[in-house]
Image (spheres, rainbow, N blue to C red):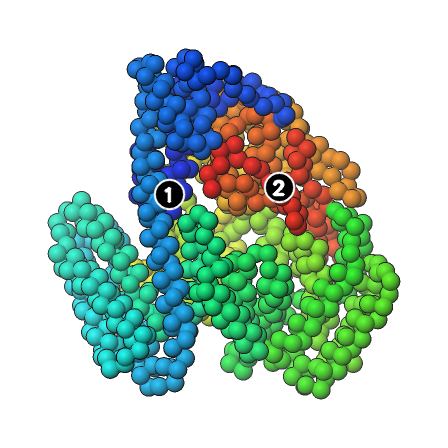
Amino acid sequence: MIQRHFKKFLQETTVIEQQRLRRFWIVLLLLGLGILGCSGLVSDHAQAKPTETVTEPAGEQESLSATKLCDKGFGQALNGDFDDALVTLQKAKKLDANASSASEAIKLLSAYIEGQQAARVQRKDEYDAAVKRVMRSLLVMDYLPGLMKTPTGEQLRKKLLVGISDAHGEASTSLVLKRTGLKDITDVIESTTDALAAAREQLEGAVKLIETDKSNYSDEFKKLAKLYSKHLQQYQDAWKSCDIKTIEDRSKEADNLQKIERDVSQSLGDLITMVSDSAWRIAIDQTRLAKDIAPEGMVLSEKPWYRLLVKEVEVFAKQAHTDAKWYDVLSAYSRLKVLDPDNLQYAESEKRAMRHVRVLRLYGTDKDTPAQDRDNWKQYVEGIDEKMVADTIPSIRGAYVTEVEYRKLLHGSLRSIKVLAETPQVTETFKGLADEKLKTDFLARIDKISTYFEKKTALNHSDLQLALSRILMASELTVEIPTGVLAREYADGFLSELDRFSSMIWPDNYPDFKKSMLGKFFGVGIQIGKEQGQPLRVSTPLAGSPAFKAGIKAEDLIIKVDGTDTAPHDVDDLVKMITGPRGTKVILTIKREGLLKPFDVPVVRDEIRIRTVKGWKMDAIGDWQFTIDPAQSIGYIRLTQFTSKTHEDLAKALGQLKSKGVHSLVLDLRFNPGGLLSSAQKVSNEFLSDGLIVSTRGRAQPLDMKRADDSGKFLTSDGDLVVLVNSFSASAAEIVSGALKDWKRCVVVGDRSYGKGSVQNVIPIRFNRALLKLTTAYYYLPSGRLLHRKNGAKVWGVDPDVAVP
């Protein structure tokens, strides 16, 4: 049963990811066999002390019984020593031909090792392809600027980005075969083949434009065009020959088309790179991929093409900064930082670019901004004043987890104010900054304030308050930026210097923060995503939500909300438009794959509970199924975050599993960012009958210990437990997995967790008009291990028992 799920999982996964997934799921399969076969693999049903370790008996392997060899083989497999495990289990099989667990494990391990060999070849091919795309992008970066100064360049770009792309936009994809009635499918096939023919015609025109060009660029373009033409022809032929008589026929044809679609999409993407101003982004992303899958021992930073790319992107970033193209600056330094995480210059440049982008998002306008949107910035600073910030500073002094470095905080605040003044896109909003003389005077006064405090031997919280007062006075005498704006920027500046998790919940964010903590709100129930300048995209409708019942589907594009185009707006604004009072109606205009015309969907808003407890699949009515293998009594529960409702829903799921006789469980905490400490404590309590769960302590916070009792539904005596974590499992997810691991209650499988082991207390500011989310303590596991990843730390988070990187 588990094998069948594993195979299905692989079929739905890209080739690049399969090597990692195979190793991950092979461990789960072996754990399942260990639960059913050889003795005591996961636990001995007795809660151990956090410091206990298990050692194997000494002696030569040959003298061990088949059972002990089987146990040893499973242990080797769970440590990732698959080759040794295979040898050991084969010996166990020789001693006992009826050892069914060993036989099954040998099959799995043999298949895995064979797959690993194939994967190594695949990784090499993927690496070579990534490097080839980097080299191609470098060619484009060198040649395209000159080409775009000629009529040929503009025509070529138009052929690809308008002609071919528009033709593709008229074509349907394989998904439509599974969604459309027979009559509609005939029309769709005809329109799609016509669209693909139009794309081929545009491609031929593009090739003719550079037919006489003898450059390396032209040679590469023609080579890519030939490949794309080949894939396009295959795709067109496949559509023409579709067998659509029955549902089964259509499903089979859809699967066949999907394979060709990947080739078409990839070859078209490579071709479009040849006329893209963002070739540097593609090059960096492909370099990151190459770095991840490079052969062992290879150092990419020593490659000439790597050094050339980094140099080119650095030049691009500096020019983008000069041109005040802040999104490009941020994108460049963020990508460079991914390639070189220890580069402090990249980190500082990224941080400064993020400030500019933030200022641009909050206050930026230009002459083309509609009149009704010019005052949007006021909602972000409404209710903020000097006193609000003044009340915040003593709270930091009294409660922050470590001693406060006020000089560092002041530097952050002054930088934040200077970034505001030096962002040209806000001059339409704050007219004083448009006057160069006034702006220069204001910045000079900021520098004087900085110099004054630099001369002081020590700073304290009063200096932080005094500096804000002087900045407000400097603004009043020069550029006259509103007090609320300066107060918000000043506070956000010094809070960003504390740590990544301390921040203000300003009045405009307060309602959304409360919703996220309660785990419910009123809306339509969709998860959404958006790219700048593009319509809103539905990631998935939440099961049982108004949107789900109204027929909204994953990958639908919401092009309008109550008649307002979504493309120009950011996600936060659109969320506010879609959510609203319970019982009210919102009209979503949907563009769906396979349908030629958009259509309106009226949806009545209702209470939306964020379901943080999920199973392995959903049934037809939208309920999660938690039993992954009924025959072997294995359950699966995934927690997506820890809200006030998580424990209640988990208890129901565990009760459902127990009623079905399930005695073993996979608890999936991968990609779980955390949440409420109280929720983590209650979740841990479901699996522990006694003992410390977590302790917290900080500079101004006394030791606080959270302990388990015996009220849980899945206690030690009830069965085996596997907990899945990865590098995105954080905070409350680390508390749960760490406590269960320390008490030997589970086997932890995956990557080392994120290392977000700090406690944030929410402190009311100015009579609850705002909230200060402040780091006040660190989490410590029962073994005494600090969860938090501090700068330069070698140890953090939860290490898996079975590492699956």
Q: Amino acid at mark 2?
A: Trp
Name the residue: 52% across, 51% down.
522
Residue 635 makes an appearance in the image: no
Name the residue: 21% across, 47% down.
251
Position of 532 with respect to 755 (left or right) is left
The answer to which of marks 1 and 2 sits earlier in the sequence is: 1
Query: Which quadrant holds residue 63?
Result: top left
- Residue 356, image x and y in percent? 60, 70
Name the residue: 52% across, 32% down.
801
- Residue 259, image x and y in percent? 25, 52
Q: Which residue is mark 1?
A: 19
Query: Which quadrant holds residue 787?
Result: top right
In-front residue for pair 753/119:
119
Q: Which residue is mark 2?
A: 796
Is label 1 in a helix, a strand or a loop?
helix
Name the residue: 52% across, 58% down.
338
Position of 161 with respect to 774 (left or right) is left
- Residue 395, image x and y in percent? 78, 52
Would you place residue 349 above or below residue 288 in this image? below
Q: Amino acid at mark 1?
A: Gln
Query: Which quadrant holds residue 474?
Result: bottom right
Crowd class of label 2 (few under 14; some 14 to 19; many from 20; radius 10 Å): some
Residue 280 makes an appearance in the image: yes
Is label 2 in a helix, a strand or a loop?
loop
| Cα gap from disc 1 to disc 2, whole angstroms | 26 Å
Position of 621 with respect to 320 (left or right) is left
Q: Quadrant of the N terminus?
A: top left
Crowd class of label 1 (few under 14; some 14 to 19; many from 20; radius 10 Å): many
Furthest-right residue in this view: 457
- Residue 436, image x and y in percent? 68, 85
